[in-house]
Image (cartoon, rainbow, N blue to C red):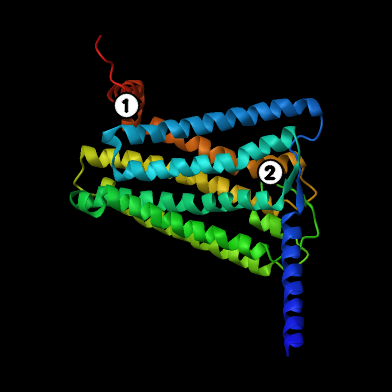
């Protein structure tokens, strides 16, 4: 009996060893990300400079607006809290894609699968979170315009933070399912023809059946896009009716309508870049289009939206423009309170 138990334990040990060995080999797998500019080599420093400039400007603008919302008490309102989360997601998107893209152009096109999974996770997290924030902002504007007297009770700062954290948790879990599904696959291809790692593109490098991965991605995309389009159509239809057809016109309604137009601009830009990227991903296997067009169309979503959001909101929202003008004064006041000058 003792010998039988020892034999079984040894066999189980060997099975576990083989399993961990296969997982380890899978995580050591290397993908080759095609650089945007393969030839001529002298163009690469210029391409790197362009993307570096875009990254620095994008992160700086988003950080400045987030700093404004934090420092200025007049901006401690639900609409600006939602905006701060939106700008934070833009920073995550730019940081997840552009530094790796610049490294690919200048240094090396190779990346390990574990690093690829990290990048794909944050891209998926951003793509899921951004439309939900835009939908929540549409609901916020609907309540502000159509129910102004009850707005302060329905939407408070604490409720805004709770809604955002609940949305963050949901999108985090939704994005975390895909790497668990892909870890089960066996890869037989090495070249990933995309600017960054996207889960569906990584799954296509497998020799196994990826029907489950495709269905999951399509279902999540369908739920997200259907939710945001439905919410936006309903809320903005009611807002337009309240502002244009109702007899209760006021200066507050005009300001709210101006803010709604700003949100519509951002939402339209997001949907355009999102669908354009989806189409480019579907055409990535086609040999008729050039590699430069494929990579530029693939990178449009990661470049356009994070850069456009702070510019649109910064120019369109009057309160943010006024806050931006007095930003140096606010920073000096904060520093003076924290580090008071002692009289000699």
Neighbor class of circle 2 (other Cα within 10 Å; few <14, some 14-19, many 20+) is: many
Measured from the top left, where is residue 181 in percent x and y?
A: 64, 65
- Residue found at x 67% / y 34%: 102
Image height check: is 277 above or below 306? below
- Residue found at x 42% / y 50%: 133
Numbered disc total: 2
Can the viewer see residue 311 in this picture? no
Residue named by callout 1? 322
| Residue located farthest toward the top when viewing the structure as drawn | 344
Image height check: is 82 above or below 163? above
Where is the N terminus found, in terms of image quarters? bottom right
Left or right: residue 172 compared with residue 136 = right
The one nearer the camera, 96 or 47, is 96
Left or right: residue 317 compared with residue 153 = right
Q: Which SS class for mark 1?
A: helix
- Residue found at x 39% / y 33%: 67
Q: Earlier in the sequence, mark 2 or mark 1?
A: 2
Q: Which SS class for mark 2?
A: loop
Left or right: residue 344 compared with residue 83 = left
Left or right: residue 259 compared with residue 249 = right
Where is the C terminus found, in terms of image quarters? top left
Q: Which mark is residue 195?
A: 2
Image height check: is 76 above or below 224? above
| Residue located farthest toward the bottom when viewing the structure as drawn | 1
Q: CA distance from mark 2 to mark 1?
A: 38 Å
């Amino acid at each position: 009996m003792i010998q039988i138990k020892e034999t079984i334990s040894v066999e189980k040990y060997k099975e576990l060893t083989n399993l961990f060995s296969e997982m380890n080999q899978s995580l050591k797998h290397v993908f080759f990300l095609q650089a945007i500019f393969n030839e001529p080599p002298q163009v690469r420093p210029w391409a790197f400079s362009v993307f570096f400039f875009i990254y620095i400007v994008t992160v700086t603008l988003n950080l400045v607006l987030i700093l404004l919302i934090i420092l200025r008490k007049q901006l401690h309102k639900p609409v600006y809290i939602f905006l701060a989360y939106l700008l934070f997601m833009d920073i995550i998107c730019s940081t997840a894609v552009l530094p790796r893209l610049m490294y690919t152009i200048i240094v090396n096109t190779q990346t390990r699968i574990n690093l690829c999974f990290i990048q794909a996770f944050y891209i998926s997290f951003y793509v899921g979170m951004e439309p939900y924030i835009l939908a929540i902002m549409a609901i916020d504007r609907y309540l502000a315009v159509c129910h102004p007297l009850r707005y302060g009770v329905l939407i408070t700062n604490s409720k805004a933070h709770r809604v955002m954290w609940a949305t963050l948790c949901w999108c985090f879990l939704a994005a975390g399912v895909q790497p668990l599904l892909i870890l089960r696959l066996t890869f037989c291809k090495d070249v990933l023809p995309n600017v960054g790692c996207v889960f569906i593109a990584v799954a296509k490098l497998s020799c196994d059946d990826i029907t489950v991965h495709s269905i999951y991605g399509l279902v999540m995309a369908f739920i997200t896009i259907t939710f945001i389009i439905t919410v936006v159509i309903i809320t903005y239809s009611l807002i337009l009716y309240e502002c244009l057809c109702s007899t209760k016109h006021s200066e507050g309604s005009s300001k709210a309508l101006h803010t709604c137009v700003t949100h519509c601009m951002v939402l339209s830009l997001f949907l355009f870049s999102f669908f354009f990227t989806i189409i480019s991903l579907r055409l990535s296997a086609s040999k008729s289009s050039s590699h430069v067009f494929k990579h530029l169309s693939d990178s449009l979503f990661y470049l356009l939206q994070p850069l456009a959001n702070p510019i649109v909101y910064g120019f369109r929202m009057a309160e943010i423009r006024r806050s931006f003008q007095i930003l140096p004064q606010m920073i000096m006041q904060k520093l003076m309170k924290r580090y008071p000058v002692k009289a000699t």
